[in-house]
Image: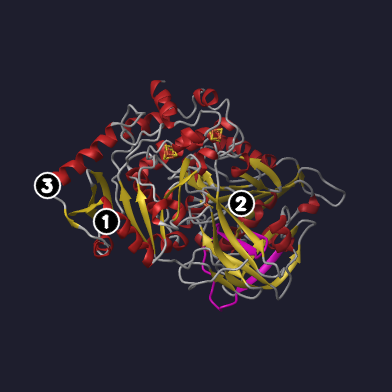
Amino acid sequence: MSCSCGSNAENVFLPKEAEIISAKKMTDTETHFSLRMKDGSTFDFEPGQIVEAGVFGFGEIPLGLSSSPTQTDSFELVVREVGKVSKALTELGEGDTMMIRGPMGKGFPLAELRGKDVLIVAGGIGLCPTRSLIRYIMARRDEFKKFTLFYGTRSPKELLFEEDLVEWRASDGVACLETVDQADESWKGNVGVITTLFEKAEGLDADTHVIICGPPVMYKFVIQKLVSIGIPHSNVFVDLERRMKCGIGKCGHCQINDKYVCLDGPVFRFSDIEELEEAI
Amino acid sequence: MKRCYISDEHLNGFVEALMGRGPVIAPVAKQSRFVFEKLETVDDLMLDYDTTILPPKVAFFPTKQELVTFDGKEAKSCINPTDQVLFGVHPYDIKGIAMSDKFYTDSHVDENYMANRRATTIVGSSVQKHYKHAFFGSVCMEVEVIGHDMFLTRVAGGYVADVLTDKGEALLGLGQFGDATDAQAGEADQVNQAAMENCPEKLENTSAQIRDKMRSSFRSDVWEELSEDCFSCGSCNTVCPTCYCFDVQDEWGLDGVSATRCRTWDSCLTAEFSEVSVQGGCENFREQRAERFRHRFMRKAAYLNEQLGGPACVGCGRCSGACTADIANPVVVINKIMEQ
Ligand code: SF4
Ligand code: SF4
Ligand code: FES
């Protein structure tokens, strides 16, 4: 099928071309891409924002950026192979072109996090979008106070970004706590659900600002723990996933009651959405 | 506003002159119903239609629209508007178009819609027959009927033509228009007033009352009861002039390399609409039929009501007629919620 096309001006659905600088398989299902815009432009975004990444003939999917905007020569995405679009993306390799629209949405509340103790609770591939903030905090360490990361996966072989973890574990003023639901022989660390890390963490208090990203079942239990520490819901931010067909507040697919994940999110203040039945 | 008059014998000549300039999309008969379609001959024009199966937004937002095309190397925009006239649009549908204009320009302008919209001259026409479920005289009275260029009202012997914009003014030279007399103008006002008053169905509450009550009924069991017979077919969305959700899908070209990204109208009442793959699993945040049924009413009568100042429902009654289970009628649903 073809169409007699007019100008490219102002078509919000027209993607830009990004060149794949590297594509690394991280696990059986995850591939880590490093990209740069082919037109030479820097890709400006905030940690936590999303893009629509696509391959023509297959479609587009929303992905959280997983690099920090402080890294300006490239940006990074992680694709988990679950459907036909993510499979097509996964099959791309170095030198190939990925179609990108964005950045879209509201990221993490940097202004509010500056000067505060920050706790990031990441479950599974929830580490990918939060990595944009973790790396941002690492790059601008003096702008934030104590930084704690909780990271949980089902098993050690699902751990992502191991090189980063090595670096983060070794950084001053950073507490990097990890857990797996099920250990294997190689695993020396904590075993148990992510909330078991609260007993190991030090210095979390009511003024700590918290980011949560992970499977929906995780939220409730993590938030209960936070409440017991005295952290108000207004200091908790959640990073939500939805199917997104447009990314510009039109198609309706990402709606949570009257909020749009693509415009108002994907990062929401928990107190703004906790009453919304369709949120978590 | 300039008020003109064109007699019955000159109307066809006017329409033919419009057809001579470009496509004219107008109500034509289709079996026992009506549809907005490109006029092939002026004899097909049915200005005494009750309502059409699909709303007139088909003229600038077709059920399937190409967005971007890819030749194997480069992506190009498919925005390519044609100047056209959308003729014979009832006031409630004009209001629906004004709402769509807002939805497609708020926060991000969608030129795939707007370019076609701008290339369209809209000539409205008065309601001569009521659709059996119409209630446009009692819903969303706060939102004005605006955005059209000319409006024709059926009066004795012809039509009073209200000229509303420069685009409308430009049409006058194409027909034998004279000035409307005071009597004709007065008759037109009466005709339009009567059309509002004579709707077969009626909502009982104001937009603000509806908005507040809708919000507070969110957790009520009544949604379960109201949606019990719903097939999740999405017909109530498809026929609605104010529904604007869509799906986006790619289609391969025959060469296996090129592809076109298209959007098609989508329905929040269908089960797949709110499915999402989260962490590899599949979640549906509106899994229950009652949740989806409620979402449609929440969106129209509460969420968009807050943005527009009145419900995103123009009272055409199409959904009431389209629903096989006979449960989609906003008059029945909203009046029931208001009684709670
Ligand atoms: S309310 Fe009626 S038209 Fe709408 S999805 Fe249910 S059965 Fe179909
Ligand atoms: S909700 Fe029903 S009556 Fe209201 S505008 Fe849509 S189709 Fe018409
Ligand atoms: S992704 Fe289309 S409205 Fe948010």
Q: Residue at x 32, y 56 (%)?
A: B12
Residue closest to the eye, A66 or A246: A246
Q: Which chain's residue wears label 2?
A: A
Task: Mark 3: give few (<14), some (14-19) or many (20+) Cα within 10 Å.
Answer: few
Q: Residue at x 60, y 72 (%)?
A: A17
Q: Amino acid at mark 1?
A: His
Q: Chain of mark 1?
A: B
- Quick check: B339 above or below B139? above
Chain assignment, label 3:
B
Disc 2 is placed on an element classified as: strand
Quadrant containing the N terminus of chain B is bottom left
Camera-near label (1 vs 2) is 1
Count of numbered badges drawn on the protein: 3
Q: Position of residue B196 (x, y in %)?
A: 28, 35
- Label 1 to label 2: alpha-carbon separation: 79 Å
Tell me the element at label 3. helix
Residue at the farthest right position? A185
Residue in the foreground of this view, choosing between A276 and A128: A276
Instruction: Give the magenta part as a residue range.
Output: A31-60
Query: Is there any visible trace of residue B295 in the rendered image?
Result: yes
Q: Are marks 3 and 2 in contact (CB under 8 Å)?
A: no
Residue extending furthest front? B9
Mark number, residue A148: 2
Residue under pointer 1: B10
The reply to whether residue A207 is visible in this rendering is no
Mark 2 crowdedness (10 Å alpha carbons): few <14, some 14-19, many ≥20: many
Q: Residues within 10 Å of mark 1 (few under 14, many from 20)?
A: some
Label ID, residue B182: 3
The type of residue carrying mark 3 is Asp
Q: Secondary structure at mark 1?
A: helix
